[in-house]
Amino acid sequence: MVDNSNGRKKSAFIAKTTVTDGAFLDFFVANTNYKISYANFVSGLGVTGTITTLGAASGTPILNVSGTVNRIRNIENGSGITSSVSASEGCEIKHNFLADGTGHAIFKNTTATQPTFASLVAGSGITLTTTSNYITIAKTAETLIGGIASLQGNSTATTIAGAGTAVLVAGTWTAEKTSTVTPSTAGRLTYTGGTNIDINFDATVSIKTASASGQTVSVYLARNGTKIDASRVTVVLDNTDKNVALTWTHTAATNDYFEIFVANDTTTDDLVVTNAVFKSS
């Protein structure tokens, strides 16, 4: 028969490029010839199948297929990146950034699984502008908060409905200076700025009673129609002018308004604020 190789040397066997199902391979150990099925031989080697790459074709392949040789590339350190063999024999890849401990860190939680880059928030008087890959921090232009209202030669009495009840000073005011604090003819200073800010308020008031003597009178700064109790100053009056000075600092938000309130703490005798200057700074 054509395919009969009985009695031939191995070097003279018929050549094939594949292994036929059910085939056996022979091997020699300690002067003894053995045979093993091809299936068991492959199973013993543990090399079934093929090795191929996965993932996007544009990625960097770890497996380098070169003809019949498959090479596994080493993972190398890059800028800000380190790699090492972990305790569990894995390949550990981690960042290698250093966060300085002085001041406030932009790069936070450096040992966390997911470190955080803090964002920047503009505070009062500061602007932040992002251009391309850099951030500009700038001081905003100085904003004047010096509003001034003046009350001169006033004869309109401030009606006192109850002893100890503070009410808005009656009279027509003049806006002397307008900035981010705007005066009104009712004696109201309104803050129109865009950020919360501490404002200093100063008021000088010439005040008298309508008729009674020995009246204890209180003067307050009021915010949004509510007197600020801690701003209170007092004076004992009769029907002749006395000067009262008030000063206070308060945080103002956009459109907050401030006024001068007065109270007769003794009786319901009306009060007259003849002259006053009310300013912010």
Image (cartoon, rainbow, N blue to C red):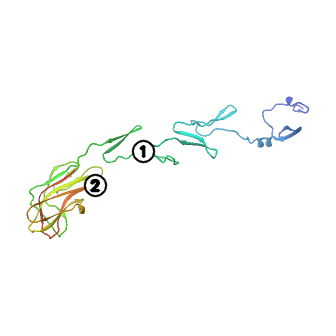
Pinpoint residue 213: horizontal percent, then vertical percent: 9, 68
Who's the residue at 19% across and 54% down the image? 202
Q: Is residue 252 above or below residue 70?
A: below
Who's the residue at 20% across and 58% down the image? 259
Q: Which mark is residue 102?
A: 1
- Nearer to us in this view, 261 or 52: 261
Kind of element beneath mark 1:
loop
Which residue of the protein is positioned furthest toward the right in this rendering?
7
Reading the image, the residue beneath label 2 is 251
Say which quadrant the N terminus sits in. Answer: top right
Kind of element beneath mark 2:
strand
Q: Is 227 situated left or right of 67 in this image?
A: left
* Circle 2: residue type: Thr
- Nearer to us in this view, 110 or 20: 110
* Circle 1: residue type: Thr
Pinpoint residue 210: horizontal percent, then vertical percent: 9, 66
Q: Quadrant of residue 15?
A: top right
- Nearer to us in this view, 54 or 194: 194
Pinpoint residue 70: horizontal percent, then vertical percent: 67, 35
Q: Given this view, does label 1 or label 2 mark the residue nearer the observer? A: 1
Q: Residues within 10 Å of mark 2 (few under 14, many from 20)?
A: few
Q: Is residue 278 above or below residue 99?
A: below
Q: Residues within 10 Å of mark 1 (few under 14, many from 20)?
A: few
